[in-house]
Image (cartoon, rainbow, N blue to C red):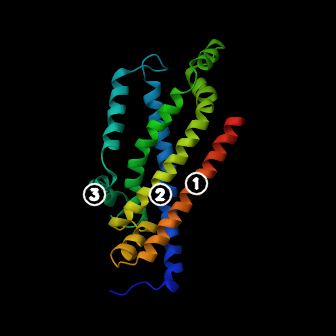
Amino acid sequence: MNNLPLSELAGYLQTAFLETFLMCGLSLVMSVILGTIFGLLIYATRSGVFWENRILNIISGVFINIIRSIPFVILLVLLLPLTKRIVGTSIGPLAACVSLTVASFAYFARLVESALCSVEKGVIEAARAFGANNYDIIRSVLLPEALPGILRGVTILAIGLLGNSANAGMIGGGGIGDLAVRFGYYRYQTDIMVITVVLLIVLVQIIQIIGDRIAARVEKN
C-alpha cells in the first residue's frame, strides 16, 4: 500500500475540508432548527409554564434522552438504513449529515432548554402583566433574553459536530477524520495524523473565539 506524499497532501486536505464544512454546516443548521423546537417544547410544557402538559413533556424529554444516551458510533450504524432511504446512499458527507443531525439536535435541545430556564421569571411576569399573550412573550421576551445562552450553545454544538464528523469518517463519511484514518492510521503515516489533529485544534479554537465574541456582543446589546 503506497503512502501519501506530503507534496500531494494539500489537494487531499482541500477536499477533506470541503467535505467537513458540508457535513458540519448542514448538520448545524438542521440541529439548531430542530433542537430549538424541541427545547422550546420541553420548556413550554413544564409545570407552571405556558402550556403545561405533563404527558407531552415526559414523552418529548424521554425521546431526547434516548437519542442522547446512544453513543454516536453506534447511532451511525443504527441509522444506516434510514440514511440510505433519505439520501440514497449510506456513505459520503451527505449521508453522514443524517446521523450528525439526529445526534446533535437532541443535545442542542437540552442546551436550549437550559438557556430558557435561565431567563428570570420576573421578566416574563412583567410582560404578562402588560397584556402580552404566550406567543408574544416567547417571541419578544423569552427568546431574546435567552439568546446569548443559546448562541453559546450553538458554539458548543459546532465544536461537537466537528468532533463527530471525524468519527463519521470512520464509516466513509469523508472529511478530515476520514483522511486521518485512511492515511494516518491504516497506512501508519504519523505526520499526516499530526497535521490533521493540529488543524482540528485550530478549527476548534477559531469556532470558540468567534462564538464567544458573538454571544458577548448580543449580551451587551
- Label 3 belongs to which residue? 77
Percent x, y for residue 157? 49, 48
Determine which quarter of the picture holds residue 90.
bottom left
Determine which quarter of the picture holds residue 215.
top right
Identify the residue at image location x=46%, y=34%: 39
Q: Is residue 211 rendered to the left or right of residue 189? A: right
Q: Nearer the viewer, residue 33 or 216?
A: 216
**Which numbered circle lies on residue 46?**
none
| Secondary structure beneath label 3 | helix
- Amino acid type at image mark 1: Ile
Residue 89 in sight in this render: no
- Label 2 belongs to which residue? 162
Percent x, y for residue 43? 46, 27
| Secondary structure beneath label 2 | helix
Image quadrant containing the C terminus = top right
**Which numbered circle lies on residue 207?**
1
Identify the mark nearer the N-term, 1 or 3.
3
Residue 50 in sight in this render: yes
Identify the residue at image location x=32%, y=33%: 62
Alpha-carbon neighbours of circle 2 within 10 Å: few (<14), some, or many (≥20)? many
| Secondary structure beneath label 1 | helix
Do the residues bearing badges 1 and 3 touch, measured as CB atoms within 8 Å? Answer: no
Q: Is residue 92 above or below residue 99?
A: below
Image quadrant containing the N terminus = bottom left
Do the residues bearing badges 1 and 2 touch, measured as CB atoms within 8 Å? Answer: yes
Identify the mark nearer the N-term, 1 or 2.
2
Q: Is residue 156 above or below residue 63?
A: below
* Cα–Cα gap, marks 3 and 2: 19 Å
Percent x, y for residue 170? 34, 66
